[in-house]
Image (tube, rainbow, N blue to C red):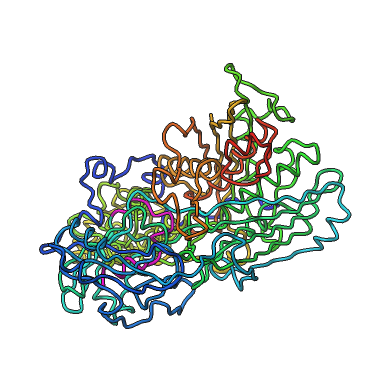
Amino acid sequence: MLDIIPTRDPAHIRHGSNSGQPLTRRDGALKVTGAARYAADNHPPKMLYAVMAVSSIARGRVVSLDVAAAKRHPGVVEVMTEQNRPALAEDPDAKTNPFMFRYEAMQNDRVRYANQPIAVVIAETLEAATEGAALLAPTYEVEPARTGLDGNESFVPPAVGVGNPSALRHGDVDGALKTSAHAIDVTYETPAQYHNAMEPHGIVAQWDGDKLSIDTPTQGLVMMQARIAGLFGIPPGNVHIRSPFLGGGFGSKGLISGPVVLGLLAAKLVQRPVKLVLRRDQMYGPVGHRSPTRQRLRMATAKDGALTAIDHHAKVASSTFDDFFEPAANASHSLYASPAIAISHEAVRLDNGTPLFMRAPGEAPGSLALECAIDEMALACGMDPLAFRLKNYAEVEPISGRPFSSKALRECYTQGAERFGWAKRPLEPRQMRDENGFLVGWGMGTAIFPALMFAAEARAVVRRDGSATMETGAHDMGQGAWTALAQIAADALALGIDEVEFKAGTSDLPDAGIAGGSAHTATAGSAIHNAGAAVIAKLAELATSDQRSPLFGAGNAGVIARGGRLHRRDDDSRSESYVDILARAGLAEVEARGNGAIDPAAQANYAMQAHGAVFAEVKVDPELGQIRVSRMVGAFAAGRVINPRLVKSQYFGGMIWGISFTLHEEAITDRRSGRIMNANLAEYHVPVNADVPPMEALMIDEHDPYVNPLGIKGVGEIAITGSAGAVANAVWHATGVRVRRFPIRIDDLLKGGDG
């Protein structure tokens, strides 16, 4: 067992005056007043509107389009099809790196899924473009659609997620299952899910020769810039992307999608600025989703309830033309200690758009199945679910043997349970009712998510007039990056947050990496911290080598930056301001860059994980089967907290997503046509205010010096991984009915469960 404690503070101790403070969002006033300019709010002069025509079949080919009728419609300027779209320098179906996925840019007449773009109508008004698209009246050569996890031949995928092995094995699972005192064999199913961010995908594009100006929501500015440059055969510097605000992304805006490329092609075709924004129903197909899963879990324990085997097998789906396989079974290799663990995946190819990253990819569906199975295993042993987890949680990562901060997970269990009142929970189901006669159930789930980090760069400038700037191409999709990263920037420069101009959101700034995997604060924040440290080091060099400075000769003793001044470590009374240092040196400013990247040695030796525990209460009408989540308590340990207000907001968002996963979300496919039948926010159910109960999020103190120099772990996705299972387990405890198909429906409870 490793009890992680900090071994050293980052160089030049400056943190605490800004970081750790619950500041309100710096961009909050802009958003609530409508002054925040999102991509589709931009209207360059002479801009045209583009509308996609999309396929109404899932498999086949386009036989005809009535282009002439569309072009005759008043206001229509052009119709772009496979016949006249501008050429691309790269094949949209080419894959040269693991983060490159295929998409539709009308490269041929084939239809690979419903809602695939098949033409783009460009017009003077949105109405004219919409009406022109309707006039295209496509005809098809239709082939049978392959839908559902049993709709095609299954196979073992070469990898899951991005380059992860599809199978891992440790110990003798089959032997342990045969000799166990207690065992279970259960199967859970989760449906396809779609991101449904409030802001649809869209682009405003303008060409000037071979230079591109783009407004579009993206979670990866520089990655998109490079991809677009390659597609059109132009230098990356010729592509300028503005993306200061995102109205939600959840992974769907991390990589370039077909509609974005079509907007660029449309603008190139007509040589005028073009805006293309997807309708809500058009987001069900070309911009990714979460695959359905069927997960079988076999578990075994000894007589004392100690786990002896975990076997987690997941069946998932990808498209017929690309590879992304939801790594659902991977949820079982890092959390519970067992001498024998096996995880494996199989897959099918279906006539749908390619599944891609969706919030907590793999971990969200995988942990739901795992946490329900853990509860079933505890019941088989006659143990309280919390006691069972406390007995079996891993103190080192089971397969790799790498240590992590297991003490933090224990604290999440104990503090969360105490706050929730778990000790009063009866072991058997259907034992509690409220004053109205509703059945009351309590459930819990363990939360775990990898503490990821990518590469990033930042630039810091301190000027002789006392001003300072920190620049990095960061992305704020609602998580509060503008605020948290500005807090890190201010501390990195030892200034107040209002004294530092923080620049982000455009591709001409240093690369902040991708805002994904709950890694953005750690990634961009580390680069910002190092850029600030580099500037402070330059100022210190100027001062300590200048005989006129009160800091002269302090090189060995060192200096501390605080409040826009450098102080000698061994004599705090001897100090000098940044302004005076630069003035004496005759410099207008001092500038430095900093990089952030994962430490390979630390990653090899330590398991990088964030932990948590979620407790949920549900109330169920005993006659109607209607379910309401009535309260939730989550306790999370995610390293150093930069802004508690923003972190709690992220935890609440994850807990709400867990409710949604268990009780609401499901994309329903028409098996005859392959079309999504509920491709809208009226019928694709997500929680509204009335569905969200009182919530508490406890921040458990954790110091992890190995994860990155700032000790930051992500908070955006971890709360999903415990919450979905907690709600499902609470439903069982209330009703005694175990539903293994999600979302849980009223009829599942009335029929007696098993999905």
Q: Where is residue 413 in the image (x, y as percent from the top left)?
A: 64, 39
**Image height check: is 96 above or below 156?**
below
Q: Give percent across and percent down for residue 487.
A: 35, 49
Q: In this view, does 495 lie to the left or right of 395?
A: left
Count the marks: how many?
Answer: 0
Please give the name of the residue rendered at 64% of the width and 21% of the height, measured from the top-left corner: 433
Quick one: 549 or 532, which is closer to the camera?
Answer: 532
**In the rendering, at what x and y percent does residue 353 appear?**
45, 64
Question: In which image quadrant can residue 521 be found?
Answer: bottom left
In magenta segment, residue 249 = yes
Segment tinted magenta in the rendering: 245-265
Residue at the limit of the structure toward the right, as seen here: 179
Taking the magenta stretch, the answer to whether it contains residue 640 is no
Choose top left, top right, bottom left or bottom right for residue 134: bottom left
Judged left or right of residue 213, residue 281 is right
Above or below for 122 versus 199: below
Residue 701 at what x, y percent from top left?
A: 55, 42
Question: Where, by quadrant of the figure, is residue 16 drawn?
Answer: top left
Quarter in which the C terminus is drawn: top right
Q: 751 or 140, which is in the foreground?
A: 140
334, 52: nearer the viewer: 52
Tell me if residue 599 can be seen. Answer: no
Helix, strand or loop: magenta stretch? loop
